[in-house]
Amino acid sequence: MEHIDDDQLATNLRYRFDYVAKFIRWSNDDIAVLNSLEPIVSPLLPVVVDAVYKKLFQFDVTKRFFFKRNEGFEGNLPSSLNDLTLNSEQIQFRKDMLSRYLTRVITTKVWDDSFLQYLSRVGKIHTNNGGSKSINVPYIHVNALLGYVEHILIDAVWGVENVDNKTKKAAILSINKFFWIQNDLFTMHYIGSSSVSNAPKDDTAIPSNTSSFAFNHHLLMTFALVAAIAVVIGYYIGGQK
């Protein structure tokens, strides 16, 4: 049994990534698979990004965050939330940011510390810890959005013609694993280090923060479930002719 250091999980980004990557069986092969998707995904990015923002505009609880001035945006804001449209200056600015993010994910060939810091920053900027006190997006919306973006990309890959099922299987599994890695780097900033440091050291220990321990336990069980689902998907797709 391999020992994992709780304190390192809470304080060392590389250590944390390596643990999650090992748990869900992420490897350099998955990075290569994402890179191979660039010719497929890049032409679809405008459609993907538009679909994401149309979804975000369907609910007032998500649309309202785009009425706040985004860090780095110096253009004009509409006078009311109802005047904010998908063609507004700030939305175009945000669409460009999302497009650049997805492009970087599928083109980065080496996941060095700099890239991990970038993925971490993507999570952090959605909280009060990211520098902008005006934007603090509740995690429920982030979680829903990540699931929706993953669904769109998987659907796009599955619908590509002239690609064999073995290749599609590898692509779907890699996309799935990537979004769980990114999701962890969101939760890291939302729940802090307490969910790791308060985990019991043995079967008899009582966690000092029950809710944090429960969340940590739930997160680990979720990773296990994802791994199991990935195996099922692999068998299913692999069996298709």
Image (cartoon, grey):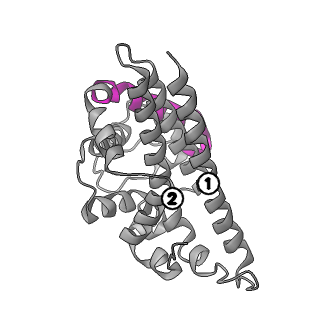
**86 and 159: which is toward the camera:** 159
Residue 134 at x, y percent in the picture: 47, 62
Q: Is residue 213 visible?
A: yes
What residue appears at the point 53 percent right and 37 percent down from the top-left corner?
148
Q: Which residue is mark 2?
A: 23
Rendering coords of residue 150 (x, y %): 49, 37
Q: Is residue 229 left or right of residue 188?
A: right
Q: Quadrant of the N terminus?
A: bottom right
Identify which residue is drawn at 33% across, 39% down: 34
Q: CA distance from mark 2 to mark 1?
A: 8 Å
Along the viewing direction, whichever of 208 and 164 lies nearer the viewer? 164
Chain part drawn in magenta: 41-62
Which x, y percent locates residue 84? Answer: 46, 36
Give whichever of discs 2 and 1 has the lower sequence position: 2
* Residue 160 placement (x, y as % from top left): 39, 18
- Disc 2 + disc 1, Cβ < 8 Å: yes
Residue 8 position (above or below residue 62): below
Q: Which mark is residue 42?
A: none
Q: Decide whether the magenta segment is chiefly helix, strand or loop.
A: helix
Q: Considering the numbered disc 1 on the image, is that residue within a helix, a strand or a loop?
A: helix
| Residue on which the image places disc 1 | 224
Image quarter of residue 200: bottom right
- What residue is shown at x 70% (from left), y 85% (from top)? 208
The amino acid type of the residue labelled 1 equals: Ala
For label 1, the crowd category at 10 Å Cα-Cα, with few meaning under 14, some 14 to 19 and many 20 or more, is: some
Q: Residue at x 57, y 48 (%)?
A: 227
Q: Is residue 87 left or right of residue 2?
A: left
Magenta-span inclusion, residue 30: no
Q: Nearer the viewer, residue 107 or 132?
A: 107
Kindly indicate the quadrant of the structure image that contains residue 112: bottom left
Q: Is residue 80 above or below residue 51?
A: below
